[in-house]
Image: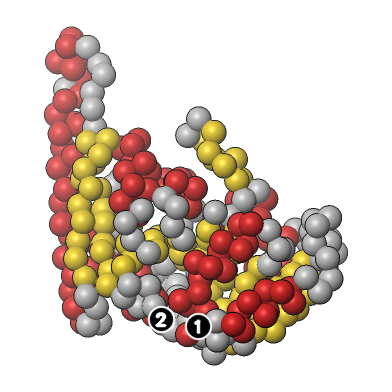
């Protein structure tokens, strides 16, 4: 079982995604399985200045030059993606999106709704990347995999060891269901519960999830931790990174309000600096 249709978002403007990040994203998509559609934006920059200001500052010329740069970047990114996907024997295609710069999150979420999964490489702590990922998680109705990419990064080429962050809540249940294609292919699955995170989290509550996973052919083990003086994000990060897991599965907590996202602490921290690839569902 695999994800049959994957949407891969690649940044084209204002900064172009590094070639290393494209290569790493293709490799991760190959590990997830299925066909891959790469998408990026041809950015439109509308002008709201008056005629005199435009004549004096030539803002129209600047805007048109930036739009042309985004189109050139898109062609360059797609060419690299197509070469890497073909080398990896992936069924693939490209999907250019045309949108005003500030409307990109909405357009990307709409495109993701007709795919099984969306992959977003992070190439640094860039607010625009986080905003796009948030729009996907909370607006697409689809799971999203985020991961750190670029020079010096080494995302896994196979998802052999998977860690599930489990608190018994709705978002976590949705994440487990969305991650089932990856879980059924993993060699090892661990369910981690942080007992002193929420009043509703109790010892032994992962037992029901273990039985559910077993019914789907997934043999998992449960572990229970306490936060002590750490945040929940620090607990998950330490468990995921130090013990060599390839994928972290977790529910995303938050909601959109006037196009600004209000996030839970762990969601905010891990979406900004994912220690390993994270599958997020809401």
Q: Which residue is mark 1?
A: 184
Specify which label sits upstream in the sequence, 1 or 2: 2
Mark 2, secondary structure of its residue: loop
Question: Pointer 2: residues within 10 angstroms few (<14), some, or many (20+)?
Answer: few
- 153 in relation to 56, above or below: below
Taking 193 as reference, is 25 left or right? left
Q: Where's the C terminus, which quadrant? A: bottom right
Instruction: Count all numbered tags in the image, as a single digit.
Output: 2
Question: Measuring 52% from the left and 79% from the top, which residue is drawn there?
Answer: 183
Q: Which residue is mark 2?
A: 1
The percent coordinates of residue 15 (x first, y second) are: 31, 50
- 198 in relation to 61, above or below: below
Mark 1, secondary structure of its residue: helix
Q: Residue furthest toward the top?
A: 52
User: As rendered, which of 26 and 219 lies closer to the eye?
Assistant: 219
User: As rendered, which of 129 and 109 lies closer to the eye?
Assistant: 109
Report how far apart the C-alphas of labels 1 and 2 lie in the structure: 7 Å
The percent coordinates of residue 40 (x first, y second) are: 26, 53
Residue 79: quadrant of the picture: bottom left
Question: Measuring 61% from the left and 84% from the top, which residue is drawn there?
Answer: 214
Q: Where's the N terminus, which quadrant? A: bottom left
């Amino acid at each position: 079982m695999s994800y049959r249709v994957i949407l891969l978002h690649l940044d084209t403007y204002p900064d172009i995604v590094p070639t290393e990040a494209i290569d790493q994203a293709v490799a991760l998509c190959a590990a997830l399985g299925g066909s891959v559609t790469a998408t990026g934006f041809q950015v439109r920059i509308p002008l709201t200045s008056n005629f005199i200001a435009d004549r004096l500052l030539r803002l129209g010329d600047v805007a048109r030059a930036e739009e042309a740069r985004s189109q050139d970047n898109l062609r360059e990114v797609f060419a690299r993606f197509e070469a890497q996907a073909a080398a990896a024997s992936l069924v693939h295609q490209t999907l250019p999106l045309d949108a005003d710069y500030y409307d990109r999150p909405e357009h990307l979420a709409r495109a993701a709704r007709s795919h099984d999964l969306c992959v977003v490489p992070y190439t640094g702590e860039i607010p625009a990347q986080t905003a796009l990922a948030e729009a996907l998680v909370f607006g697409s109705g689809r799971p999203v995999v985020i991961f750190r990419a670029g020079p010096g990064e080494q995302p896994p080429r196979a998802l052999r060891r998977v860690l599930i962050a489990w608190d018994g809540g709705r978002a976590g249940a949705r994440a487990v269901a969305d991650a089932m294609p990856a879980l059924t292919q993993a060699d090892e699955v661990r369910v981690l519960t942080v007992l002193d995170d929420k009043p509703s989290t109790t010892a032994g509550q992962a037992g029901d999830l273990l039985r559910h996973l077993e019914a789907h052919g997934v043999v998992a083990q449960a572990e229970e931790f306490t936060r002590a003086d750490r945040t929940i994000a620090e607990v998950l990060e330490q468990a995921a990174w130090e013990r060599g897991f390839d994928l972290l599965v977790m529910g995303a907590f938050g909601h959109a309000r006037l196009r600004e996202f209000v996030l839970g602490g762990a969601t905010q921290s891990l979406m900004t600096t994912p220690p390993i690839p994270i599958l997020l569902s809401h």
